[in-house]
């Protein structure tokens, strides 16, 4: 399934790359750099999907260290290859893309070779395909897929509005927005790692009908995510420029991007609620509860993106993240305790 999706996506993305890049907010000035990076990067789609997707089979069988090695190995290799290709071989932005693709391929090979070992309880094989199982995988996986699509769509919409209302500052605003999104990756990835690592606990206790322990998982995942995100929240409100300087060097861009990071992350603690509840419900297979909660927050974000530029300065568009995080988390908590929690109790009692 991952190979089929990867090959299809690669073909479509390369075929329509020009239209896609301009839709994403690319300008004529940025296009030569964007198309170079995009074409090479997209060529590694299959390797990236297989590496990330099949790594879950390593983690699910209890080989956490091996799963971590596959990710760290790719990241470290990318760190080494980036300066080598960009500066030593003078390949510029194309070098950065090649470094990423090579790293993804190496991670993929590690994952596949590990799962091919006979000593692994559930190892990779060919044949015995079940349409019923494929359907179940798609029904649960579609939740993460749709959330990821929506997450990327709102970034696209943000760039479009920055281009539309930014005037001569459009390119600079989009560049600073990319810095904000890079900061949010540091927020999201570890938090997602916590919920992914605990996904088997959610599913196991739900299947066993143990309501109390399932609720404990919700609580502890929230506390872990809140502790980590809270620490980053303090940093984003006090010293955002420390992170921003990793990406931009001129004083105007540093000041602008630091301001955007502060505005975007003011309500970031609400993300801990979303991860604990939405990802937890997804791990239990309760997509019908999880998806509306996730979509509500994204609809708020989208609404803010379109409304804020009409009623205030464009730079305040970055409060869209704060508004959606605060209101989205309050809505999630209200629905969870008033509706979803009693439903889960009844469902588990019936198991």
Image (spheres, grey):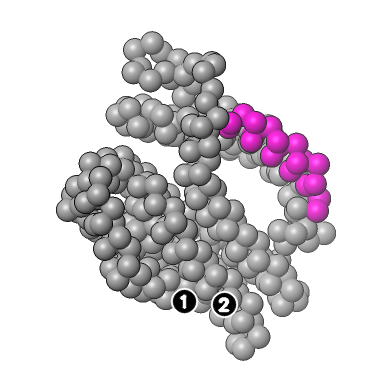
Tell me if 146 is positioned left or right of 243 in this view: right
Residue 341 sits in quarter = bottom left
Which residue corresponds to mark 1?
A: 323
Q: Nearer the viewer, residue 86 or 8?
A: 8
Horizontal side of 181 relative to 69 (left or right) equals: right
Compared with residue 56, is residue 18 higher up or lower down, i.e. above or below? below
Q: Is residue 15 magenta?
A: yes
Q: Is residue 9 magenta?
A: yes
Label 2, on which residue?
A: 304
Quadrant of image for the C terminus: top left
Up/down of 125 relative to 288, above or below: above
Residue at the extreme front of the image, as rendered: 350
Q: Secondary structure at mark 2?
A: helix
* Residue drawn at the location 54% of the way across and 16% of the way down: 127
Kind of element beneath mark 1: helix
Horizontal and vertical percent for residue 186? 43, 53
Q: Earlier in the sequence, mark 1 or mark 2?
A: 2
Position in image of residue 159 (x %, y %)? 66, 65
Question: Residue 226 location, x and y as percent?
Answer: 29, 61
Q: Quadrant of the N terminus?
A: top right
Q: Please name the residue shown 52% across and 73% down the image.
A: 300
**Decide: marks 1, 2 in contact (CB < 8 A)?**
yes
Please identify the dominant SS of the magenta region.
helix
The image quadrant of residue 201 is top left
């Amino acid at each position: 399934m991952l190979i089929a999706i990867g090959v299809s996506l690669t073909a479509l993305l390369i075929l329509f790359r020009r239209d896609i890049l301009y839709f994403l907010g690319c300008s004529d000035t940025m296009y030569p750099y964007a198309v170079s990076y995009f074409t090479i990067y997209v060529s590694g789609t299959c390797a990236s999907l297989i590496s990330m997707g099949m790594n879950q089979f390593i983690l699910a069988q209890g080989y956490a260290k091996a799963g971590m090695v596959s990710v760290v190995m790719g990241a470290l290799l990318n760190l080494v290859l980036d300066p080598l290709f960009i500066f030593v071989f003078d390949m510029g932005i194309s070098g950065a893309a090649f470094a990423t693709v090579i790293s993804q391929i190496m991670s993929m090979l590690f994952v596949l070779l590990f799962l091919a070992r006979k000593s692994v309880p559930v190892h990779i094989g060919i044949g015995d395909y079940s349409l019923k199982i494929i359907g179940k995988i798609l029904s649960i996986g579609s939740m993460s897929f749709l959330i990821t699509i929506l997450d990327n769509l709102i970034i696209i919409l943000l760039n479009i509005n920055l281009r539309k209302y930014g005037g001569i500052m459009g390119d600079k605003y989009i560049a600073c927005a990319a810095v904000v999104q890079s900061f949010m990756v540091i927020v999201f990835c570890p938090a997602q790692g916590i919920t992914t690592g605990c996904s088997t606990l959610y599913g196991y206790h739900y299947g066993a009908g143990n309501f109390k322990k399932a609720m404990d998982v919700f609580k502890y995942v929230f506390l872990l995510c809140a502790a980590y995100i809270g620490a980053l929240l303090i940093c984003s409100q006090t010293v955002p420029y420390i992170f921003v300087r990793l990406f931009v060097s001129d004083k105007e861009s540093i000041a602008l991007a630091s301001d955007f990071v502060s505005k975007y992350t003011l309500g970031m603690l609400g993300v801990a609620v979303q991860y604990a509840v939405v990802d937890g419900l997804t791990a239990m297979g309760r997509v019908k509860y999880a998806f509306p909660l996730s979509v509500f927050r994204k609809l708020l974000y989208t609404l803010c993106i379109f409304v804020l530029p009409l009623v205030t300065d464009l730079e305040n568009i970055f409060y869209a993240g704060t508004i959606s995080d605060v209101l989205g988390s309050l809505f999630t908590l209200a629905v969870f305790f008033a509706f979803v929690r009693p439903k889960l109790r009844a469902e588990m009692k019936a198991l």
